[in-house]
């Protein structure tokens, strides 16, 4: 199999399965498969699972670039768009779960929440960013936007920061898990900064002090 | 495990001395008509097996005897036993709602004792049996409103907190009463992380504590409390957010000053000392105007939250003249 075939036949289907597994787990429990259940508060369980999956996939999307370089596997890039789209998909499900299951279509309350509750406001901004990225994720959009595409898609960084922040802001007291997420995000972003600095100093180093190696 | 539960019990004053007063004091009680003998009997079943070996689960005790109190019960449909006992905020056993049920199964709720301290004539350490003996158990179906904006309806078994507190003869200096949960990280894995400042502490103003709605709870759905619901002794204050209803109580202390309470210490701008259910005062991060009643339909019906959780007619008078936005 060529690399192309391996991705199309094996790795991409695996991403599909992995990304949809949490949803299958929710559905299975929701319909009582094998005696499972969503517990006393199914709405909260669904809301949380979708939020968590969105964040997991977002961080996984951000891990693609470092992994490509560290594992010397540049072909991993082929999975990035799919992961990013699934992150957006789950963020949308999370938002829909909130509106349908928690607020039960209380639209004025949604407006109030977005305006008055900072953790929801930043979640909303994150969803809006992810929507913009998803809408411009096609090859055509890439060609059409040219250099602006790159700049637009840096939006994933604030989206991830806001996502983790939103997670940490909604807990009552137990910040341990959000802090783990913040740590992972810091590593992913820090790695990029470190690479950029390394790249900058090596180019400037070669131009200003050519004799020193 | 060395803990308060295994220490020797030495009440300052024999329990027999404080029993009769409390038994005869309260005429409201449903069982009063049955007479003192029956009253003793009502709380006795727990006694015969009090020195159960470690792990003496509530299910191995004879079931509690009780009478239903219609006066203090709502007609709303109770949330299922399964939901009441599997969806709990009891951070001593973990912060996930499913953690308490998973982690509290081996908790030793018997033998148990409670220390009484502070501004009261009767102080000391009392066994759970001493505490329960004179009180007739009532079943009261209360609304339970969590600060997280979900709610349940729960048939508790208990007796008025005021009846218990009277037995300790609080002095005129006692203006508040503080409750403390067991501190035992060996048995309570949640206490191994500094999520809250352990042990958990709560408090009430004396007049709140003496209000007939304030319930000392030992059971639910006709059974002794399961560990995850705060066995063997917890408070239920139905007009306040759930976190005021402290679980697994090992200490009662009468104080002159307002006691520090765990959630207030953790986030003073979000959780006040009073924590009365109030749809007009939002939590800084979410609205308190509505609640989702768990167990009603697959996704829980959203209903308006009522002032004082629907108990305004009974308790609003306690707060007359107080600015409830300031004292949230
Ligand atoms: C308009 C947008 C959003 C709204 C209205 C919203 C709403 C909420 C609400 C109400 C909760 C609290 C759940 C609870 O306490 O039961 C929550 C939790 C959470 N949200 Fe969002 N959210 C939004 C966007 C996002 C985004 C973009 C992400 C991630 C990329 C995200 C990830 C999470 C996570 C991880 C949790 C915590 C789940 C847990 O406790 O395990 N949310 N969200």
Image (cartoon, coloured by chain):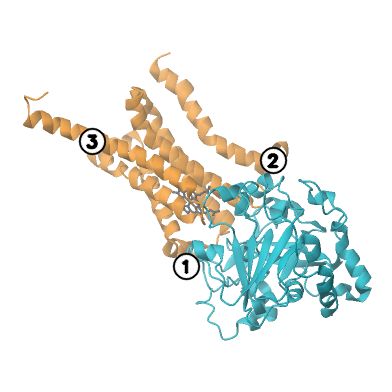
Chain colours: A orange, B cyan
| Residue pointed to by mark 2 | A36
Q: Closer to the N terminus: mark 3 or mark 2?
A: 2
Of the numbered discs in the image, which one, if any, rests on residue A163?
none
Q: Residue at x 36, y 23 (%)?
A: A71
Q: Is residue A153 above or below residue A10?
A: below
- Distance of label 2 from label 1 (alpha carbons): 39 Å
Q: Nearer the viewer, residue A167 or B320?
A: B320
> Chain ID for label 1?
B
Q: Residue furthest bottom?
A: B321
Question: Mark 1 vs mark 3: same chain?
Answer: no
Q: Secondary structure at mark 3?
A: helix
What is the x, y in percent for residue B235? 69, 65
Query: In the rendered image, which quarter contains the C terminus of chain A?
Result: top left
Return the chain for callout 2: A
List the residue tagged with mark 3. Answer: A196
* Vertical relation: B71 (above or below) A195: below
Left or right of B255? Residue B141 is right
Label 3: chain? A
Q: CA distance from mark 3 to mark 2?
A: 48 Å
Q: Quadrant of residue B29?
A: bottom right
> Which mark is nearer the camera, 1 or 3?
1
Residue furthest top as drawn: A1
Q: Residues within 10 Å of mark 3 (few under 14, many from 20)?
A: few
């Amino acid at each position: 199999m060529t690399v192309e075939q391996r991705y199309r036949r094996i790795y991409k289907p695996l991403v599909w399965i992995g990304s949809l597994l949490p949803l299958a787990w929710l559905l299975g429990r929701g319909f009582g498969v094998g005696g499972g259940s969503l517990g006393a508060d199914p709405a909260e369980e669904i809301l949380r699972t979708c939020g968590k999956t969105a964040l997991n996939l977002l961080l996984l999307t951000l891990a693609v670039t470092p992994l490509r370089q560290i594992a010397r596997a540049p072909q991993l890039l082929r999975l990035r768009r799919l992961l990013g789209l699934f992150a957006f998909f789950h963020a949308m499900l999370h938002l829909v779960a909130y509106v349908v299951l928690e607020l039960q279509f209380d639209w004025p309350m949604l407006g109030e929440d977005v305006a008055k509750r900072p953790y929801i406001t930043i979640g909303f901004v994150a969803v809006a960013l992810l929507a913009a990225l998803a809408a411009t994720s096609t090859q055509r959009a890439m060609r059409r936007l040219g250099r602006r595409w790159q700049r637009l898609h840096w939006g994933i960084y604030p989206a991830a920061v806001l996502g983790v922040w939103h997670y940490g802001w909604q807990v009552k007291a137990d910040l341990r898990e959000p802090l783990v997420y913040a740590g992972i995000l810091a590593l992913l972003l820090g790695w990029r900064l470190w690479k950029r600095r390394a790249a900058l100093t090596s180019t400037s180093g070669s131009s200003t002090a050519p004799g020193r190696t | 495990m060395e803990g308060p539960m295994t220490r020797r019990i030495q009440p300052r004053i024999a329990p027999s001395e404080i029993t009769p007063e409390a038994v005869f004091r309260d005429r409201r009680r449903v069982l009063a008509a049955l007479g003192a003998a029956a009253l003793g009997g009502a709380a006795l079943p727990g006694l015969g097996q009090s020195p159960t070996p470690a792990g003496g689960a509530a299910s191995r005790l004879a079931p509690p005897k009780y009478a239903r109190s219609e006066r203090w019960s709502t007609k709303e449909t109770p949330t299922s036993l399964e939901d009441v006992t599997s969806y709990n905020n009891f951070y001593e056993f973990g912060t996930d709602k499913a953690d308490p049920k998973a982690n509290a199964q081996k908790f030793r709720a018997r033998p148990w004792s409670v220390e009484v301290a502070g501004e009261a004539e009767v102080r000391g350490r009392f066994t759970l049996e001493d505490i329960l003996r004179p009180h007739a158990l009532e079943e009261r179906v209360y609304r339970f409103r969590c600060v997280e904006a979900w709610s349940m309806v729960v048939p508790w078994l208990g007796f008025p907190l005021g009846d218990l507190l009277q037995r300790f003869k609080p002095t005129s200096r006692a203006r508040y009463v503080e409750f403390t949960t067991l501190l035992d990280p060996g048995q309570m894995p949640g206490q191994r992380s500094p999520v809250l400042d352990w042990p958990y502490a709560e408090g009430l103003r004396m007049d709140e504590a003496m209000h007939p709605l304030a319930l000392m709870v030992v059971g639910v759905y006709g059974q002794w409390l399961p560990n995850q619901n705060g066995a063997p002794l917890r408070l239920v204050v139905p007009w306040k957010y759930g976190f005021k209803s402290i679980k697994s109580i090992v200490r009662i202390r009468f104080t002159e000053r307002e006691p520090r309470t765990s959630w207030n210490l953790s986030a003073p701008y979000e959780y006040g000392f009073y924590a009365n259910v109030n749809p007009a005062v939002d939590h800084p991060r979410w609205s308190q105007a509505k609640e989702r009643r768990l167990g009603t339909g697959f996704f829980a019906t959203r209903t308006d939250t009522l002032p004082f959780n629907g108990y305004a007619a009974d308790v609003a008078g306690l707060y007359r003249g107080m600015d409830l936005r300031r004292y949230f």
